[in-house]
């Protein structure tokens, strides 16, 4: 070897390249439950979310859990009020990198007005809950069907 090349150590000398360790993505936990639009929708959606709290490290009796469940209740109630022709809604829960995203998708393509003037009391409350946990409320067209997805992102408290 010439020059300083003999001092170069391969970063994967212990089995994995250093870059792979430094840039490894955290595990993503994602759960989606299809809930029929109807009188039991709020209860079913809340039970589906509660069923995965332990897996993502949320204490069921915590104020964070209460905020998440209130968010689910409000988003599902909005589907019942504003997307009555949706036969189903998909309630999603995605946790990764210290964040939790709650999503509710329906078959109504019209996006909600998320301006302060345009939001109703329920979405305003959801936006405030998200902000309490350094998160945000957003909505976007669904990718795989005619409809939309409303998303609420939270930072999971330590």
Image (cartoon, rainbow, N blue to C red):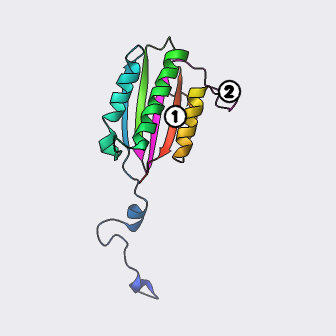
Q: Residue at x 46, y 39 (%)?
A: 101
Mark 1, Cα crowd under 10 Å, few <14 / some 14-19 / many 20+, is some
**Image position, residue 98 (x, y; %):** 43, 51
- As measured in the structure, the alpha-carbon distance from the residue carrying label 2 to the one carrying label 1 is 17 Å
Extent of the magenta region: 95-120
Q: Residue at x 44, y 51 (%)?
A: 157
Residue 138, by quadrant, is top right
**Image position, residue 143 (x, y; %):** 51, 28
Quadrant where the C terminus sits is bottom left
Quadrant where the N terminus sits is bottom left
Which of the two residues, 137 or 62, is positioned nearer the viewer here?
62
Residue extending farthest to the bottom is: 3
7 horizontally vs 134: left or right:
left
Report the magenta stretch's main SS: loop
Q: Secondary structure at mark 1?
A: strand
| Pointers 2 and 1 in contact (C-beta within 8 Å) | no
Task: Name the residue that disc number 1 marks.
Answer: 151
**Image position, residue 60 (x, y; %):** 34, 40
Q: Which mark is residue 101?
A: none
If you read the primary sequence from the N terminus, does the residue marked by circle 2 or circle 1 appear first? 2
Residue 118 colored in magenta in the image: yes
23 horizontally vs 147: left or right:
left
Q: Is residue 135 visible?
A: no
Q: Residue at x 64, y 31 (%)?
A: 114
Which of the two residues, 111 or 67, is positioned nearer the viewer here?
67
Residue 81 sits above or below residue 104 on the image? above
Task: Name the residue that disc number 2 marks.
Answer: 118
Q: Residue at x 54, y 45 (%)?
A: 132
């Amino acid at each position: 070897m010439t020059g300083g090349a003999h001092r170069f150590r391969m970063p994967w000398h212990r089995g994995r390249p250093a870059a792979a360790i430094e840039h490894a993505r955290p595990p993503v936990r994602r759960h989606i439950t299809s809930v029929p639009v109807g009188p039991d929708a709020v209860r079913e959606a809340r039970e589906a979310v509660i069923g995965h709290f332990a897996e993502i490290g949320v204490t069921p009796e915590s104020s964070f859990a209460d905020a998440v469940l209130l968010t689910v209740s409000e988003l599902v109630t909005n589907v019942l009020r504003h997307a009555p022709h949706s036969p189903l809604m998909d309630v999603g829960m995605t946790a990764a990198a210290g964040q939790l995203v709650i999503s509710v998708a329906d078959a109504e393509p019209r996006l909600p007005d998320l301006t302060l003037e345009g939001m109703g009391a329920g979405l305003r409350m959801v936006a405030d809950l998200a902000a309490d946990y350094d998160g945000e409320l957003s909505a976007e067209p669904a990718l795989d069907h005619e409809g939309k997805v409303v998303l609420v992102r939270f930072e999971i408290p330590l």
